[in-house]
Amino acid sequence: MKNLFVGNLPHSTTEAELRSLFEPHGAIDRVSVVTDRETGRSRGFAFVEMTNADEADKAVAALNGTELEGRALKINEARPKEKSGPGSGRPGGRGFGGGGGGGRDDYRGHARQPREPRW
């Protein structure tokens, strides 16, 4: 079994259309078009799970770069989702933290002056 990532999809693409596109290349276990949680609109990519790994490789070779409604499809083997958060390793990205603001004891190099008691 092999899971394929299908990117650069037209937002109008349905699961049935993807199934009919991939079926000539082998048995399909599952098709899922990824949608936005809030709007329900397609996010422009999907996953196609094929039963046979060899058939999946042939489907990638045959369909990668083909056009669907004027858009060149980008198809490859799906990679596991990376964990997000600090140090997630996103290129050019920065995790949380960094930078300096100081607290109330930050006197920027000056010695702290003792305070008089308030009574």
Image: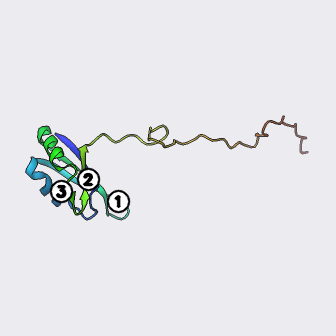
Left or right, 36 with reference to 29: right
Residue behind mark 3 = 18
CA neighbours of label 3 inside 10 A, class few (<14), some (14 to 19), many (20+): some
Secondary structure under badge 3?
helix
Mark 3 / mark 2, whichever is N-terminal? 3
User: Is 115 in front, or is 78?
Assistant: 78
Quadrant of the image containing the C terminus: top right
The answer to whether mark 2 and mark 1 are in CB contact below 8 A is: no
Q: Which mark is residue 36?
A: 1
Q: Position of residue 77 (x, y in %)?
A: 24, 41
Quadrant of the image containing the N terminus: top left
Q: Position of residue 19 (x, y in %)?
A: 15, 55
Residue behind mark 2 = 46
User: Is 53 in front, or is 38?
Assistant: 53
Task: State the image quarter where residue 113 is shown.
Answer: top right
Task: State the image quarter where residue 100 is shown.
Answer: top right
Camera-nearest label, 2 or 1: 2
The answer to whether mark 3 and mark 2 are in CB contact below 8 A is: yes
Secondary structure under badge 2?
strand
In space, the residues marked 3 and 2 are separated at their CA atoms by 9 Å
Amino acid type of the residue that numbered disc 1 sits on in the rendered structure = Asp
In space, the residues marked 3 and 1 are separated at their CA atoms by 18 Å
Vertical relation: 34 (above or below) 12: above
